[in-house]
Amino acid sequence: MPATFATFTRLKDKGIAALKSGDYASARPYLIQAAECMIELSEESSDAAKRAEQESYAKELMELAKDCDRRMKRGGGAGGGPGGRGRGERARDDNDKGADASDWVVKERPSVRFADVAGLEDVKEEIHLKMIYPFRHPELAQHYGIDVGGGVLLFGPPGTGKTMIAKAIAGELEATMFVITPAQLMSKWVGEAEQNVRKLFDAAKSEEKSIIFIDEVEALVPKRRSSDSTVMQRVVPQILQELEGFDRKAGRALLFMGATNEPWSLDTAMLRPGRLDAKIYVPLPDAAARFKLFEIYLGKRPLADDVDLAALAEKTDGYSGADIKAVCNRSASELFLESVQGAEPRKITLRDILSAIERTPPSVTRKDCEKYDAWAAQQS
């Protein structure tokens, strides 16, 4: 699918926000990708004036990206404001071959389990079959010729819990999880992008069981264009090489997981067998999952007797998990504000929550869902 204005806006906003905060290393890749996205949009336009305006905008974004390079070379910030550097980040000199992955990758052992994930039973079963069972029963996997580890893509609308599912998988496997962002891999302050990819995989392979998790993976491996000469042209092949290079039948198994709200923006080479070949659709929560979400987000709050979780679940058809959390927070925050301003503290009523629902529309449209359904159907 072609680039969309929503994709451009998201990348541009992230790049500008990072630039304003002085995080030039993070801003640069987002600005470059936003520019490339705008160029692609301009090529689809039949209006010459609009096309020229879009191309001019793309050039401005590329100039901002170049300015990030200049600022970094002069010793500008790489996180935490001008002149500062993010945790574990450092400038390089001629003798520095780049920072170790341990200096900039978040490494954790999640305690989250599938029981903590509301609903999505079909998704959980698919994950068990493709990932968890081969890890837990390596002898049987070897007996039947099932590979242990590999690549997995979690895709679906925003706010459906893809990151939490990734952590739950790591928790179920008791695996070490390496959590990174595309901006970290692209940062010049921690080495060249290709070296960062290699060091990340090397660090993961040193663990008995490990998961590399990259959110917004489409920002790291976007569709490549023959006319582009950006760093992504080198990063994508490096990641493909690393994915194909590790021995899935060895004693140390590695799972590479990417999450995305825009699976159609990924480089098609990443979706071939042996790479992100297991594609798992994480849809909006069904009624049972919505009930569980309200139970989680309202469970520790003072509720009136008239609060009917089943009715709330029915009322929020089409809402994401993030939307439901926002509804619960909004209904509680308004009562808290009333109390702070002198009103008698009271319990949250069904009317309070319904009012919050009315003022919090779902963030995902039916048209969005149809787009995800169509992409999922193409992959089957």
Image: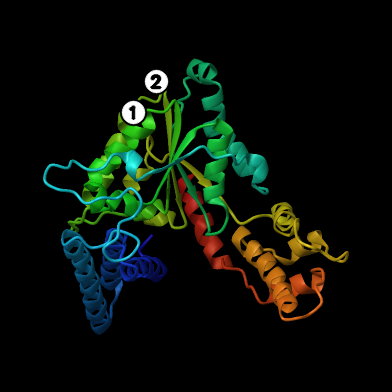
Residue extending farthest to the right is: 305
The quarter of the rendered structure image containing the N terminus is: bottom left
| Residue 100 image label | none
Q: Secondary structure at mark 2?
A: loop
Residue 351 position within the rendered picture, expressed as x and y whole percent measured from the top left: 80, 74
> Counting other residues with Cα less than 10 Å from the Cα at mark 2, is it few (<14), some (14-19), or many (20 or more)?
few
Q: Is residue 195 above or below residue 233?
A: above
Q: Nearer the viewer, residue 262 or 75?
A: 75
Residue extending farthest to the bottom is: 49
Q: Based on the displayed image, in which of its 4 quarters is residue 74 positioned?
A: bottom left
Amino acid type, callout 2: Ala
Asked if labels 2 and 1 touch by Cβ distance under 8 angstroms, the answer is yes
Residue at left offset 32%, top offset 40%? 101
**Mark-to-mark CA distance, 1 and 2:** 8 Å
Instruction: Write down the residue under mark 1.
Output: 246
On the question of residue 318 being in view, the answer is no
Residue extending farthest to the left is: 94
> Counting other residues with Cα less than 10 Å from the Cα at mark 1, is it few (<14), some (14-19), or many (20 or more)?
some
Instruction: Write down the residue under mark 2.
Output: 250
Amino acid type, callout 1: Phe
Judged left or right of residue 334, residue 200 is: left
Residue at left offset 18%, top offset 49%? 92
